[in-house]
């Protein structure tokens, strides 16, 4: 399957299109199943072409691999059936990769401190200026200025890291729980809290351990 590279103005929409196709119920008759898969394949191709590295992207390769497995499962199954669950499993595998691409896009967008600050405020809508100031490492006055749309010129790396960590926490926690997570001592941090690590070591040193902790929490809850 040959893939050419294009610019990426609608990556998020292309991810959403593939997810929408995957969410559409698989029809029973074989000819309708074939049409369903063709529409899904077209959506996947559109997404891959929009990726910066096109078909060379690792996740693009996985999407192709799993979609081939899905096609084989559809061809092998009798009309209206999935006797060994192969179709359902293949759909889940394709969907997992597509969601991973979506998370990558979200992280890339959050490299912009202004976008990252907006994400933090949207993810923690009930958090007070005091809590937000502690997490962001700024005064409550600065929190108010950022909420009003002022440029984010201070602690930009910390704002970006906080937003990216929250992308993992929000999948398994309430907004209040996410705030409390930063105040909980962790054995992986030698008994320090995530907030203490941020304050004492800075965002560059805190990035890897905090991201690993947040990802690990989501993985444990998924198991």
Image (tube, grey):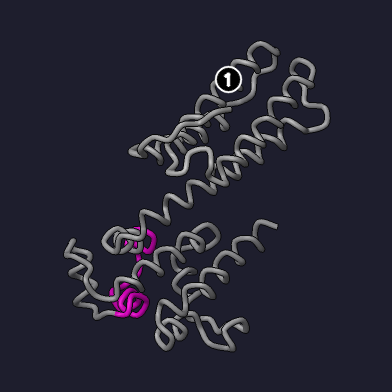
Q: Quadrant of residue 163?
A: bottom left
Instruction: Give the camera-side residue of 25 and 167.
Output: 167
* Outermost residue to the right: 84
Magenta-colored span: 121-137
Q: Left or right: where does residue 49 sit relative to residue 26?
A: left
Q: Quadrant of residue 6?
A: top left
Q: Residue at x 54, y 21 (%)?
A: 39
Question: Is residue 101 on the magenta stretch?
Answer: no
Rendered location of residue 35, percent (x, y): 59, 15
**Relative vertical location of residue 6 with respect to residue 197 in this rendering, above or below:** above
Rendered location of residue 154, percent (x, y): 24, 75
Main SS type for the magenta part? helix
Q: Residue at x 78, y 21 (%)?
A: 77
Q: Residue at x 64, y 23 (%)?
A: 26
Callout 1 secondary element:
helix
Rendered location of residue 42, percent (x, y): 52, 24
Residue carrying label 1: 38
Rendered location of residue 45, percent (x, y): 51, 29
**Relative vertical location of residue 97 with respect to residue 198 in this rendering, above or below:** above
């Amino acid at each position: 399957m040959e893939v050419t590279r294009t610019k990426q103005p609608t990556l998020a929409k292309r991810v959403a299109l593939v997810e929408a196709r995957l969410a559409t119920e698989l029809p029973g008759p074989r000819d309708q199943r074939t049409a369903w898969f063709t529409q899904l394949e077209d959506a996947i191709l559109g997404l891959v072409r929009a990726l910066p590295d096109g078909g060379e992207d690792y996740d693009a390769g996985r999407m192709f691999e799993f979609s081939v497995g899905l096609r084989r499962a559809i061809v092998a199954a009798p009309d209206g059936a999935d006797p060994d669950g192969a179709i359902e499993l293949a759909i889940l595998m394709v969907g997992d990769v597509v969601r991973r691409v979506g998370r990558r896009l979200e992280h890339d967008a959050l490299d912009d401190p202004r976008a990252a600050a907006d994400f933090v405020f949207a993810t923690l809508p009930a958090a007070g200026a005091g809590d937000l100031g502690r997490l962001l490492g700024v005064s409550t006055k600065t929190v108010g200025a950022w909420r009003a749309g002022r440029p984010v010129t201070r602690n930009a790396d910390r704002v970006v890291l906080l937003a990216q960590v929250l992308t993992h926490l929000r999948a398994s926690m309430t907004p209040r729980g996410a705030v409390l997570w930063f105040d909980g001592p962790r054995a992986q941090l030698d008994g320090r809290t995530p907030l203490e690590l941020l304050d004492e070591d800075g965002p560059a040193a805190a990035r890897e351990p905090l991201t690993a902790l947040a990802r690990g929490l989501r993985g444990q809850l998924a198991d």
